[in-house]
């Protein structure tokens, strides 16, 4: 990574900001492109001023030009939280389609490797469990979540077409639910919501009957997996996630215990097309990238809770 120059799209978001940080630590120069739709310069403010870091306000769905050498494009721009993509449905479809086209075009123009941040959501409400990369998914193309799921499925298809028809050097990573410090307390995802509610002593709102499962991966593990794919010449798609699966009620109870809160758990309406189960089969990542998650959910949740306890006093109410 030394002496390389990397473009991170969506670099001012949750995952993108960690990628920028880790790439700089490894000696790379980083150009962070973001339109701040769901991210914020505050996520990378500690990097601003470093000579090897450039933050550029840029909407990937419009004209994208990065002067000079580029060795790697990590395409992470896209709303990711259901609350965000339901609030920005057209923007989400545009960044997944036109944004991916422009990011691929940039990588092709520079002869750079391209890594697409795809998602476990391409599996939809899965009929196969756990999910292997060979599973094609079960997505409702006109359901509310389709703006995200189908945009990512299209982005995977486009990335594959660039590889097969134009010889582009591409990789696709299917990221499963990732959590950690720097998530927005009001971004609507389960972990920030439960932690915020527990810390404030408010009822913890679990959707449905709480039996639906997710497998949660600490951000450092996810970033290790993404960089392992970036460093390889593997095309993927490859799952990156922690197979430790738990129900939403178990997650809420764990967070309540770790915060020492006495918040009650309140069951609320379950969103349309919400997947019933989600667990990655990570054998391909182990075999091809030598990657496996290392941080157990309780340790990761503790670190996240510590960060939220401080952040809640400084974040604007609706962030
Ligand atoms: P995030 O919302 O924190 O970050 C996304 C970033 O993309 C934001 O900074 C946003 O402003 C930027 N962006 C959105 N549209 C843009 C556009 N048109 N032009 C330029 N920038 C734009 O989300 P995140 O959790 O960091 O997710 C990052 C990527 O990883 C996304 O592509 C998401 O689909 C993928 N992913 C994340 C998870 C997860 O658990 N966090 C899981 C699966 C996949």
Image (spheres, rainbow, N blue to C red):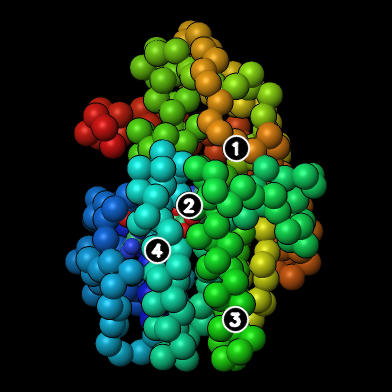
Between the C-alphas of marks 4 and 2, the distance is 11 Å
Disc 4 residue crowd, few under 14, some 14–19, many 20+, Cα 10 Å? many
Q: Work out whether mark 3 precedes mark 1 in sequence or the reverse, and give the earlier one.
A: 3
Q: Work out whether mark 4 precedes mark 2 in sequence or the reverse, and give the earlier one.
A: 4
Name the mark on residue 95. 4
Name the mark on residue 147. 2
Residue lying furthest front: 142
Residue found 75% across the figure and 51% down from its top: 131
Residue found 30% across the figure and 63% down from its top: 34
Residue designated by label 3: 161
The x and y percentages for residue 31 are 32, 73
Q: Work out whether mark 3 precedes mark 4 in sequence or the reverse, and give the earlier one.
A: 4
Residue designated by label 1: 273
- Secondary structure at badge 4 equals helix
Residue found 26% across the figure and 61% down from its top: 35
Q: Within the image, what quadrant is residue 46 found in?
A: bottom left
Is ligand 1 less than 8 Å from the beta carbon at label 4?
yes
């Amino acid at each position: 990574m030394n002496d390389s120059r990397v473009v991170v799209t969506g670099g001012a978001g949750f995952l993108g900001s960690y990628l920028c940080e880790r790439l700089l630590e490894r000696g790379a120069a980083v150009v962070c492109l973001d339109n701040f739709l769901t991210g914020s310069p505050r996520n990378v403010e500690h990097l601003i001023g470093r000579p090897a870091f450039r933050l550029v306000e840029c909407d990937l769905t419009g004209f994208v030009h990065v002067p000079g050498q580029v060795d790697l494009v990590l395409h992470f721009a896209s709303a990711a939280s259901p609350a965000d993509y339901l609030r920005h449905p057209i923007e989400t479809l545009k960044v997944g389609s036109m944004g991916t086209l422009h990011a691929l075009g940039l990588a092709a123009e520079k002869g750079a490797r391209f890594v697409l941040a795809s998602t476990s959501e391409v599996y939809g409400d899965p009929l196969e469990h756990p999910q292997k990369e060979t599973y094609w998914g079960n997505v409702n193309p006109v359901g509310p979540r389709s703006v995200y799921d189908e945009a990512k499925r299209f982005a995977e298809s486009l990335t594959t077409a660039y590889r097969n028809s134009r010889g582009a050097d591409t990789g696709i990573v299917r990221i499963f639910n990732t959590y950690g410090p720097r998530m927005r307390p009001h971004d609507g995802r389960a972990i920030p919501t439960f932690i915020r509610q527990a810390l404030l002593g408010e009822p913890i709102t679990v959707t449905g009957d709480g039996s639906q499962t997710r497998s949660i991966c600490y951000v450092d593990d996810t970033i290790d997996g993404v960089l392992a794919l970036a460093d390889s010449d593997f095309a993927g798609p490859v799952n990156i996630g922690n197979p430790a699966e738990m129900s939403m009620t178990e997650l809420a109870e764990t967070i309540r215990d770790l915060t020492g809160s006495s918040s009650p758990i309140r069951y609320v309406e379950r969103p349309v097309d919400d997947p019933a189960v989600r667990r990655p089969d990570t054998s391909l990542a182990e075999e091809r990238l030598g990657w496996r998650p290392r941080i157990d959910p309780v340790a990761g949740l503790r670190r996240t809770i510590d960060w939220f306890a401080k952040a809640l006093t400084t974040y604007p109410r609706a962030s």
